[in-house]
Image (cartoon, grey):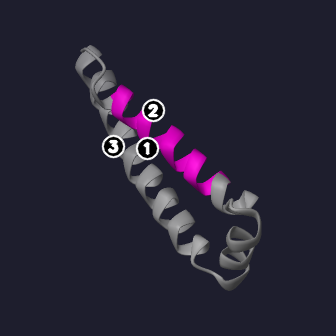
């Protein structure tokens, strides 16, 4: 029974890693939009939407790695 639970945690970790990478890539894509580029050139920072994707992706990725590497 413990082995089944461990496999579920590993699978959840892999899913979170994939979601995290996807969110970061999506944020990178959104940062190339005209409005985001204009905002970056005027203020020197990315829009809130882009930052949410970057932060959400990083948190998801780190949580996924920690779950995947969790001791069995």
Q: Secondary structure at mark 3?
A: helix
65 above or below 4? below
Query: Residue tagged by mark 3?
Result: 14
61 above or below 7? below
Residue 36: mark in rendering: none
Residue 63: mark in rendering: 2
- Are the residues at dot 1 and dot 2 in contact (C-beta closer than 8 Å)? yes
User: Is 15 left or right of 10, judged from the image as shown?
Assistant: right
User: Is 61 left or right of 2, judged from the image as shown?
Assistant: right
Identify the mark nearer the N-term, 1 or 2: 1
Snapshot quadrant of residue 71: top left
Q: Residue at x 59, y 46 (%)?
A: 55
In percent of width and height, residue 50 lies at 65, 61
Quadrant where the N terminus is found in the figure: top left
Query: Residue tagged by mark 1?
Result: 16
Which segment is the magenta one?
A: 52-67
Q: CA distance from mark 3 to mark 2?
A: 10 Å
What secondary structure predominates along the stretch shown in magenta?
helix
- Are the residues at dot 3 and dot 2 in contact (C-beta closer than 8 Å)? no
In percent of width and height, residue 72 lies at 24, 15
- Are the residues at dot 1 and dot 3 in contact (C-beta closer than 8 Å)? yes
Depth order, front residue of 35/56 = 35
């Amino acid at each position: 029974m413990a082995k089944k639970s461990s496999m579920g945690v590993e699978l959840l970790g892999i899913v979170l890693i994939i979601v995290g990478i996807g969110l970061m890539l999506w944020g990178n894509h959104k940062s190339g939009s005209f409005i985001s580029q204009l905002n970056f050139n005027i203020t020197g920072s990315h829009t809130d939407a882009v930052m949410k994707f970057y932060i959400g992706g990083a948190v998801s990725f780190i949580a996924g790695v920690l779950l995947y590497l969790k001791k069995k």
